[in-house]
Amino acid sequence: MSNQGVPNHPAVEKVTAALAEAGATGQVRWLDDAATTAAQAAERLGITVGQIANSLLFLFDGVPTLVLTSGSHRVDTAWLGEQVGATITGASKEQVKEATGQVIGGVAPVGHPAPVPTYVDTALAAYDEVWAAAGHAKTVFPTTFDELVRVTGGTATAVAPEDQ
């Protein structure tokens, strides 16, 4: 990749390899500037914030668990915990790095050191194309809701009540 002027980064290489292994169709894209929020990523890509799949790590009864949520709303941890039968708490930046091998702002849905249980927000199904981080704050890749569920081995679920 570096031969073509594209930066190399170990986490991005792991994500790219995981996507290829899973047969994902989207290619990792490097942005000119970091996009550490859904709003920044959407602006740089010229899409709606709802099309951004935020990769958020929580602890479900102490187990690191990824929740991929639409950038257009927040995870209701109390409500989601009731739905899945777990107490959900936030993860520290150290726990995020340990579980995913990536840092906050660039956490991808794949490419982790070991499988991470994953829930995929059904709100993402409303879009033909969604974008997720690819292991670095300057990287993203396009995908679809169905492909995101498939490549992560995730469970499709609402992450907040419909009226939120």
Image (cartoon, rainbow, N blue to C red):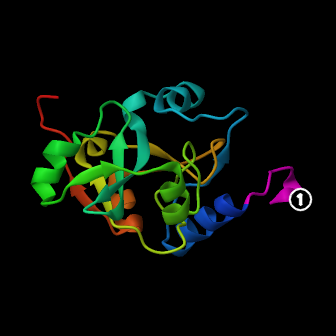
The answer to whether one can see residue 46 in this image is: no
Across and down, in percent, residue 148 comes to 39, 58
Asked if residue 136 lies left or right of residue 128, the reply is: right
Residue situated in front as seen by the camera: 155 or 56: 56
Provide the major secondary structure of the magenta segment. loop
The residue at 57%/47% (across/down) is: 106
Asked if residue 98 lies left or right of residue 88, the reply is: right
Q: Amino acid at mark 1?
A: Asn
- The residue that label 1 is drawn on is 3
Residue situated in front as seen by the camera: 112 or 61: 61
Across and down, in percent, residue 10 comes to 71, 63
Q: Is residue 14 above or below residue 160?
A: below
Whether the magenta-drawn stretch holds residue 8 is answered as yes
In which quadrant is the N terminus drawn? bottom right
Asked if residue 12 lies left or right of residue 38, the reply is: right
Residue range (magenta)? 1-9
The residue at 66%/58% (across/down) is: 12
Residue situated in front as seen by the camera: 38 or 91: 91
